[in-house]
């Protein structure tokens, strides 16, 4: 099952992250301001986030595998519309529906892993699954800018479309596990609310979701502006921005490959604390105006730090509740993508009012403090009788 799920993670990552280095290309192609083109990211992230409270209970009730298949086929259809979009409005609409579909891919797949893998091996299995998503991020970030300059930004999403169709076929025909019997009756609002009550009954839930919201806001909120910053400083454009952003995926891939060793030597709270420190490095590097080659190297550290925090929190989410694990992971994605959706808007406002460098420094300070803070708070919950790490 892990291979088809990994393929779905690859498709989801391309649909999600390929837009980051393409903002200036979209602005030129559709003759709109960069701030307007950057909304293509928010138009994906917002429905991804706000669809989660619905998709999570639906996956728990109707079956996670069934939900995953539907969302993968819808994602492929929306990518086809993006490739053919004649106006920025059509592109926004396709991104919106694609974001809604994307909301049922990664969280449902992770919930399936949570169902199938024992707790002792869960973080390792999730790390390996996420490596496919990180490969998609590396491809999307590094190749997107290059294809945009020499062919078209549409070529990136054409490749994503092919992979999305392949993943939909693989999950539809090769994931043969059956969903558990559906509960009697029909899914209701009361049923969904009861599931979320069970999730939030765990004292770690609010901390898990607050952490990933801040991650999305501070780290992913600045990514759409990397190409513009490079162009303003006469240091590069979409291609260089893509290489810099690919560093996040490279660092995350290193994390996935070294995770078994890391779990032997570091406690989960130590991984969180170290992760916050490393995650801030790339943001500070952009604030200080490092050459794009150096910034790409520093963003590898950011990717490693981000995964140290993020994957540790994911492991905590898997243990919040077994009965409503789909709802738990959907709320995780809801919180994360709310941060990603609001991030470009707030960072853009900050750049216009405070300037680029002060805004980036603020983002870096937030990440720098986040890791040690959550490590301390998770440690306090453990001492207070929370479930074991």
Image (cartoon, helix red, strand yellow):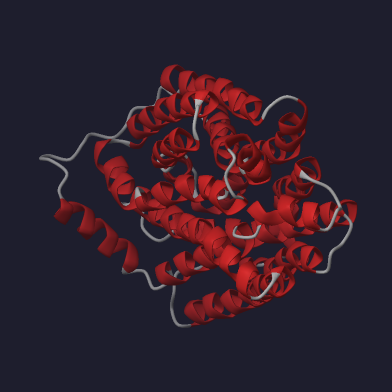
Where's residue 307, x and y in %?
65, 56
Q: Residue at x 21, y 36 (%)?
A: 182
Q: Quadrant of the C terminus?
A: bottom right
Up/down of 255 relative to 134, above or below: below
Up/down of 168 relative to 42, above or below: above
Where's residue 191, x and y in %?
18, 52
**Residue 277 placement, left or right of 102:** right
Residue 367, picture quadrant? bottom right
**Residue 9 placement, left or right of 141:** left
Residue 313 visible in the displayed image: no
**Residue 228 placement, left or right of 295:** left
Residue 311, picture quadrant? bottom right
Residue 243, picture quadrant? top right
Residue 94 visible in the displayed image: yes
* Residue found at the far left of this picture: 185
Q: Residue at x 49, y 61 (%)?
A: 342
Where's residue 111, x and y in %?
43, 45
Where's residue 369, x and y in %?
65, 78
Residue 143 versus residue 385: which sits nearer the camera? 143
Tell me how many marks there are: 0
* Residue found at the far front of this picture: 31
Residue 373 versus residue 34: which sits nearer the camera? 34
Q: Residue at x 39, y 32 (%)?
A: 71
Residue 200 versus residue 341: which sits nearer the camera? 341
Q: Residue at x 44, y 60 (%)?
A: 335
């Amino acid at each position: 099952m892990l291979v088809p799920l990994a393929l779905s993670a690859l498709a989801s990552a391309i649909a999600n992250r390929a837009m980051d280095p393409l903002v200036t290309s979209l602005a030129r192609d559709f003759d709109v301001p960069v701030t307007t083109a950057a909304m293509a990211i928010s138009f994906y992230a917002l429905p991804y986030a706000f669809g989660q409270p619905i998709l999570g209970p639906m996956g728990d009730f109707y079956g996670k595998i069934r939900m995953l298949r539907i969302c993968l086929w819808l994602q492929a259809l929306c990518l086809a519309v993006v490739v053919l979009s004649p106006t920025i409005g059509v592109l926004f609409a396709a991104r919106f529906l694609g974001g809604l579909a994307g909301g049922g891919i990664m969280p449902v797949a992770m919930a399936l892993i949570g169902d199938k893998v024992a707790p002792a091996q869960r973080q390792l299995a999730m790390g390996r699954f996420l490596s496919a998503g990180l490969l998609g991020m590396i491809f999307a970030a590094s190749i997107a800018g290059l294809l945009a300059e020499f062919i078209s930004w549409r070529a990136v999403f054409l490749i994503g479309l092919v992979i999305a169709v392949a993943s939909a076929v693989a999950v539809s025909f090769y994931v043969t596990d059956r969903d558990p019997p559906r509960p009697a009756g029909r899914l209701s609002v009361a049923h969904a609310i009861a599931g979320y009550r069970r999730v939030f009954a765990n004292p770690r839930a609010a901390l898990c979701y607050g952490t990933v919201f801040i991650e999305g806001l501070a780290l992913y909120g600045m990514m759409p502006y990397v190409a513009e910053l490079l162009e303003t400083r006469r240091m590069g454009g979409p291609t260089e921005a893509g290489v810099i952003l690919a560093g996040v995926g490279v660092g995350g891939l290193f994390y996935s490959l070294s995770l078994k060793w890391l779990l032997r030597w570091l406690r989960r709270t130590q991984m969180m604390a170290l992760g916050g420190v490393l995650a801030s490095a790339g943001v500070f590097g952009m604030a200080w105006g490092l050459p794009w080659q150096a910034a790409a190297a520093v963003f590898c550290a950011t990717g490693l730090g981000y995964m140290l925090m993020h994957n540790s929190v994911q492991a905590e989410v898997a243990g919040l509740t077994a009965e409503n694990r789909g709802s738990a992971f959907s709320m995780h994605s809801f919180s994360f993508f709310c941060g990603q959706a609001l991030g470009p808007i707030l960072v853009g406002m900050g750049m216009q009012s405070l300037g680029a460098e002060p805004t980036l420094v603020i983002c870096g300070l937030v990440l720098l403090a986040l890791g040690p803070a959550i490590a301390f708070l998770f440690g306090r919950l453990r001492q207070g009788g929370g479930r074991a790490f």
